[in-house]
Structure formats: C-alpha cells, structure tokens
Amino acid sequence: MTNNTDSQRIAWALTGSGHYLRECLELLDELQGVDLFLSAAAAEILTMYGYDLDTLRQHRRVFRDTTASSVPVGLFYSGNYHTVVIAPATSNTVAKCVYGISDTLVTNIFAQAGKCGVPSIVFACDTEPELESEAPRSIVKVYPRSIDLENVERLRQFEATRVVSDMAQLRDAVEVRIPCPNAACS
C-alpha cells in the first residue's frame, strides 16, 4: 500500500469522555480532510454535552459504532487514512488498546491502523494522579487509578503511537501529521 498523504485523510475517533471534548471538537473544526468515528459511548456523551450529530455530519463524514464487525475499518485497507487520532480517549479505551481488545469501532480502528502501518495519536484522559475534568454541568476533580496511569505508560511504548496529555501536545502532534496545514495549499 502506498502512503500518499496528499489524498489521504485523518480518522478522528471520539470515545465516551467529556475531558477536553469541547477543545478537541474545536481543533477538529479547524482541520480539513477529517472523518469522525464515534464509539457508542461517544454518541451518547455528545448529546449530554450539547452537541448535535446532524450538525457534526454537515462538515464531515461521521461513522458510528452500529455494526458488530466495525465495517468502516475496511477503509484502512484501502489506504484512505494517514493518521488516527483518538481524542479524548477514556481509560477504558486506553486499556482495551493496550491489551489488544478491539470490540468497539474506536478500538478496532486503532488495531487496524497498527496493522496497516498508520500512525496513531492518543489524547489519554487519565495522565496524572489528580485532574480537573469537564462534566456536563461543571468541572470535577478526578483521581485516576494506578492501573489507568500504568496503561497510559504502556500505550506510550506502542510502535507508531504518540500519547499526548494536553491540548498543546495534541495540536502539535496533529500539525506534524497534516500534509498541508493551510486550506489554500497548492
């Protein structure tokens, strides 16, 4: 498979986390050539945080976790994507990625991306022993468990996977992967 990043897209996956969800969606809105992949939990939390799926579909292709075999992963075998971004990524998604469990659309695209040599960027939610996170109606303190922190460290060791822990790192990692950052590139 050839990697022609000029014609390939970014596969951006959302999981069931509100941690920096608004900021991730704002970054996503700045980008072109991005398809959105939603876990079942992501579809639920988007509504909880006031986002409308129909509005998201107006600006990009949106794939939902509605099939047992995660049919959209076939797009990776056709060379449609140059990068996977999972942002934000719950501790559940991180753990499944670390242990090779691909039973959701998001964990399946992570696995298939790895098998197809497509680099991944993962914005893990649980990266510090104490965090503030946005809940639907307020900011809350969260205290990730040691297993959550250990899984983030394990994921950092994966080949072709960059784990980021804040929006600045996410933006930098995404910008490195964009073949033409300006819409007016020729």
Image (tube, rainbow, N blue to C red):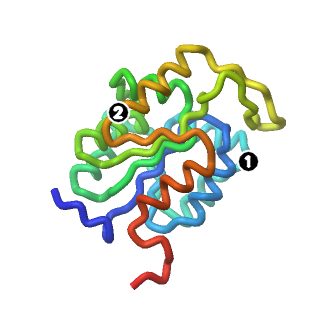
Instruction: Estimate the x, y position of residue 45 in percent, counting from the top left.
Output: 65, 38
Q: Alpha-carbon distance for marks 2 and 1?
A: 34 Å
Q: Residue at x 43, y 42 (%)?
A: 162
Instruction: Estimate the x, y position of residue 6 in percent, counting from the top left.
Output: 32, 71
Left/right of residue 170 with respect to residue 142 in the rendered view: left
Disc 1: which residue: 50
Name above or below for residue 186 compared with residue 130.
Answer: below
- Secondary structure, mark 1, is loop
Q: Report the amino acid beneath label 2.
A: Phe
Q: Is any part of residue 38 visible from this angle? A: no
Left/right of residue 166 with respect to residue 172 in the rendered view: right
Name above or below for residue 1 compared with residue 116.
Answer: below
Q: Is disc 1 surrounded by few (<14), some (14 to 19) or many (20+) residues within 10 Å?
A: few
- The residue positioned farthest toward the left in the image shown: 1
Disc 2: which residue: 158
Determine contact: label 2, label 1, CB under 8 Å. Answer: no
Q: Quadrant of residue 8?
A: bottom left
Instruction: Estimate the x, y position of residue 10 in percent, counting from the top left.
Output: 41, 57
- Quarter of the C terminus within the rendering: bottom left
Q: Which mark is residue 88?
A: none
Name above or below for residue 1 compared with residue 151.
Answer: below
Q: Quadrant of residue 80?
A: bottom left
